[in-house]
Amino acid sequence: MTPNPRRNPARSATRPQGQITRGKTAPNRLRRVDAFLAAYDPALITRGDGDYQRALYVDLGYGAEPTTTLESAARLRRLNRKLGVLGVEIEPDRVARAQPFVDERTDFRLGGFNLPLKTDRSGHAETVRLVRAFNVLRQYDVEEVRPAYDQIMAQVLPGGLLMDGTSDPYGRVWTANMVRRTALGWELEALVLGLNTRGGLDPDAFQTRLPKSFIHRMVPGDPAFRFMEDWKAAARDTRSAETWGPRAWFVAAGKAMKTKGYDVAREDLWLKRGWLVWRDCGLEI
Ligand SMILES: C[S@@+](CC[C@H](N)C(=O)[O-])C[C@H]1O[C@@H](n2cnc3c(N)ncnc32)[C@H](O)[C@@H]1O
């Protein structure tokens, strides 16, 4: 009798976990996100100690074309030219389309939240330092976010990161959860609002692009809602800075968040680059 794959634990462990969603992507859409990743924790990209020797950067859910993965690989390899990059897609045709771009340091595989890692001939298993999942969980139900994080983070090395984010079609406005693998499991270490100031600043635009974990929590009493309300108020209060351009306004609003008590990381440098990083945000997912 042929075993039912649904009942076969070995088969279901390797079957990609998740669902096929729309594959919309665009060249350079995640350029700012790549720049942020390189600046946020450069030591994570470069470290090569212990299990980090074979640790990959995984772009989970790269979409209809592997362009954003290849762009990201080129940018992060400015920090670590040997960086192994793995693009993962749950849709087989999208994986097939990426095969011409496979090389010694770059692979594209069929997979899901249970990342399709391999072991080489000498028995060395691949490991993972960083996972980016952009515009992926947005298309799931909110109840699916935590289990997805659990699955992904189980394969990330201690100290490693998951960046779960959402952007507009052109990457002008984006937000992300920075999730760190700790000794005890994982924790949300920061919520980031990212802006390409060339497109101007619309303080309301971030709310509709929040990560899935928070987009449905815009209700009074929720700390994520309070943060967004405080951000919009900070933007209103500092509007006069717009005279010097959207960047100056974004910086002024970010500094006002700091005076309201938010732990805004490296505000002098990162706000100027269009990144408001709310560290130790204490938000529950
Ligand atoms: C909107 S595209 C995002 C493409 C790219 N990351 C970007 O932001 O431009 C989302 C992609 O995620 C893929 N996807 C959804 N769930 C997935 C999962 N569990 N594992 C791997 N890929 C997944 C979909 O098949 C789709 O191609």
Image (tube, grey):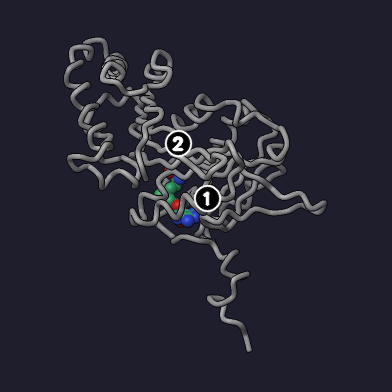
Residue 154 at what x, y percent from top left? Answer: 56, 50
Q: Quadrant of the C terminus?
A: top left
- The residue singled out by tag 1 in the image is 152
Callout 1 crowding tier (Cα within 10 Å): few <14, some 14–19, many ≥20: many
So how many labels did they put on this image?
Answer: 2
Measured along the vertical axis of the image, is residue 224 above or below residue 261?
Answer: below
Asked if disc 1 is less than 8 Å from ligand 1, the answer is no
- Judge left or right: residue 78 versus residue 167: right
Report how far apart the C-alphas of labels 2 and 1 lie in the structure.
Answer: 13 Å
Expressed as whole percent of the image width and height from the top left, the position of residue 226 reads: 23, 33
Horizontal arrangement in the rendering, residue 159 relative to residue 230 (left or right):
right
**Towards the viewer: 109 or 41:** 41
Classify 10 Å Cα crowding around label 2: few (below 14), some (14-19), many (20 and above): many
User: Where residue 205 sits in the image (x, y, percent)?
Assistant: 25, 34
Going 40% across and 50% down the picture, which residue do you hit?
137
List the residue tagged with mark 2. Answer: 178
Residues 187 and 171: in front is 187
Q: Is residue 123 left or right of residue 85?
A: right
Q: Nearer the viewer, residue 145 or 112?
A: 145
Q: Which residue appears at 50% of the width and 38% of the height?
A: 180
Q: Is residue 137 visible?
A: yes
Query: What amino acid is found at the position of numbered circle 1 in the picture?
Result: Ile
Q: Is residue 268 above or below residue 164?
A: above
| On screen, residue 64 above or below 32 | below
Furthest residue to the right? Answer: 122
Residue positioned 23% across, 37% down in the render: 225
Q: Amino acid at mark 2?
A: Met
Secondary structure of the residue carrying numbered label 1: helix
